[in-house]
């Protein structure tokens, strides 16, 4: 499987329409999706036949994978007479297939339907593979994948994760869709989501947090058929603003076994949080929202505390969407902790008074390199009452994080071991909420004391005289050289 995808990426890299990991991952995603959709519909049609019922296809026959991408003869072999390639293929994809798929959103009323989601996925996508022969090769490789096989699906999910990781490490804006896997795992393990509860990420990206929560939840013992049904259909919810992030997130969840993900494509911050009721809220919120951005006045009207800083608007969204008794683990820029202007103070006041902000994790510099060097933290809070004290933990890798030396699971082992009981250690300490001034939540580790060697005055004087003698000799040498030049 990995070899096939590696071969595919090598082919796409040579195409004139592809530029970088972000571009070829996007193109692989839409092709994978259409192959998945074909296998999904074929499986549903077979089940209907066995049950003596009929299946109504989502795509009409002309635009199904087995008709246009890789047509087969009666023996299941590729029908070379019907295969499109070169200009014929790109013309069909660009002028017929994509316009057909884009219309699904306007044709469908139900936003939860598969047809509507197809329209959402292709609304802002386009085929960027310029060479029709390159596209032909790509289709042939992906046609070999079997989405009806659980083993193939699992292997492909791992391969796709690697693609997203490569894209996340690529330069530019690609990183906004990818949070380091080690960080996602640590946050999800700390939250420890249980089956029967809902999980929400309003800045879903490639859906890494939702998938990690799913991986943890499906390992729980003695799950009933009702549990599995709830886990697959009513547990995971997300919102993603960007078209590319949306298609990759949906594709990622499908590959991990969630057939019809509850992912919306919209700007989360356009939701008026005053309208959110308890029935609309979620048990767990895990997220790494975009920060450093600005929102215009119209969007700010959706929040009681108005600010053009996206991180502050997202914080209000998280707080409003957490159920009574719910848990949240959120990545935030360090500035949100120490900033004490009016808007920041008001939001943090609400956080401390209405929620239990029990943990703040200081992440090392370089966690999000190369696309961002912003210093970040993770805050954990529950909707179980007000904050009494905060457990701070400082993640300290033994080396400086870089693009090629990223943060790994081992860096969070000590944190996870201490987290449940909030134990104090060399890297952790507790601050009482009453001791916090002006809602400044930044704190220095009191246990990390650097030893300073204080010399006696007599030795300091000797060092000064030695330094003066060295400087005097150096000046004499320079003067002698200048005299010789004259």
Image (tube, rainbow, N blue to C red):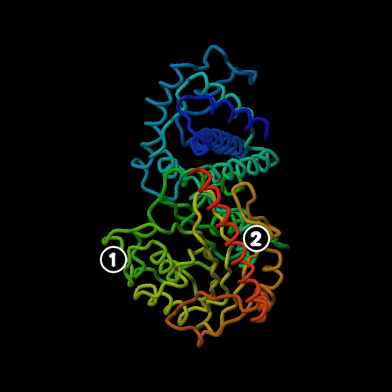
Which residue is under mark 1?
Answer: 301
Locate residue 166, reporting x and y percent: 58, 42
Q: Is residue 91 visible?
A: yes
**Foreground of the two, 469 or 285:** 469
Dot 2 and dot 1 residues touching (CB under 8 Å): no
Disc 2 to disc 1, how far (Cα)? 37 Å
Which image quadrant is residue 38 in?
top right
**Foreground of the two, 367 or 58:** 367
Up-down: is 211 above or below 470? above
Residue furthest bottom in the image? 434
Which residue is under mark 2?
Answer: 217
Up-down: is 220 above or below 138? below
Residue furthest top in the image? 81
Frontmost of labels 2 and 1 is 1
Up-down: is 260 above or below 389? above
Locate residue 117, reporting x and y percent: 44, 44
Locate residue 468, reporting x and y percent: 59, 67
**Foreground of the two, 29 or 345:** 345
Is disc 1 surrounded by few (<14), some (14 to 19) or many (20+) residues within 10 Å?
some
Residue 96's label in the rendered image is none
SS under mark 2: helix
Locate residue 181, reporting x and y percent: 62, 53
Image quarter (top left, top right, bottom left or bottom right) of the N terminus: top right
């Amino acid at each position: 499987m990995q070899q096939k995808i590696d071969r595919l990426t090598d082919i796409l890299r040579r195409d004139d329409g592809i530029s970088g990991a972000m571009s070829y991952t996007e193109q692989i995603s839409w092709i994978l999706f259409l192959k998945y959709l074909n296998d999904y519909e074929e499986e549903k049609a077979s089940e209907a036949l066995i049950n003596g019922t009929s299946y109504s296809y989502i795509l009409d026959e002309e635009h199904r994978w087995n008709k246009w991408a890789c047509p087969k003869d009666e023996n299941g072999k590729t029908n070379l007479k019907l295969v499109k390639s070169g200009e014929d293929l790109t013309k069909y994809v660009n002028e017929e297939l994509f316009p057909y798929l884009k219309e699904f959103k306007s044709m469908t009323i139900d936003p939860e339907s598969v047809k509507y989601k197809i329209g959402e996925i292709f609304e802002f996508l386009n085929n960027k593979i310029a060479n029709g022969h390159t596209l032909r090769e790509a289709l042939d490789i992906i046609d070999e994948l079997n989405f009806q096989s659980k083993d193939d699906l699992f292997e492909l999910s791992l391969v796709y994760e690697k693609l997203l990781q490569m894209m996340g490490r690529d330069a530019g804006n690609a990183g906004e869709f990818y949070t380091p896997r080690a960080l996602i795992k640590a946050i999800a393990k700390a939250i420890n989501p249980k089956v029967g509860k809902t999980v929400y990420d309003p800045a879903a990206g490639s859906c890494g947090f939702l998938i990690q929560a799913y991986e943890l939840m499906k390992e729980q013992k003695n799950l009933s058929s009702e549990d599995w049904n709830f886990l697959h259909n009513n547990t995971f919810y997300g919102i993603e603003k960007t078209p590319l992030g949306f298609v990759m997130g949906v594709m990622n969840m499908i590959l991990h076994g969630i057939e019809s993900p509850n992912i919306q494509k919209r700007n989360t911050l356009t939701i008026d949080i005053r309208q959110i009721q308890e029935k609309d809220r979620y048990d767990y919120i895990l997220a790494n929202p975009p920060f450093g951005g600005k929102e215009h006045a119209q969007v700010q009207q959706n929040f009681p505390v108005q600010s053009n800083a996206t991180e502050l608007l997202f914080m209000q969204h998280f707080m409003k969407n957490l159920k009574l008794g719910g848990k949240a683990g959120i990545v935030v820029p360090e500035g949100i902790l120490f900033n004490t202007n009016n808007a920041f103070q008001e939001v943090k006041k609400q956080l401390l008074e209405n929620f239990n902000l029990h943990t703040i994790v200081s992440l090392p510099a370089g966690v999000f390199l190369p696309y961002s060097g912003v210093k970040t933290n993770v805050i954990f809070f529950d909707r179980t009452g007000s904050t009494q004290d905060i457990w701070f933990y400082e993640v300290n890798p033994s080396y400086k994080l870089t693009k090629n030396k990223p943060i790994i699971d081992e860096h969070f082992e000590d944190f996870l071991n201490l987290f449940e009981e909030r134990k104090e250690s060399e890297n952790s300490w507790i601050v009482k909420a009453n001791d916090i001034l002006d809602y400044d939540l930044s704190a220095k580790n009191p246990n990390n004391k650097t030893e300073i060697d204080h010399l006696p005055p007599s030795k300091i004087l000797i060092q000064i005289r030695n330094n003066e003698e060295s400087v005097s000799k150096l000046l004499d040498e320079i003067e002698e050289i200048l005299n010789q030049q004259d």
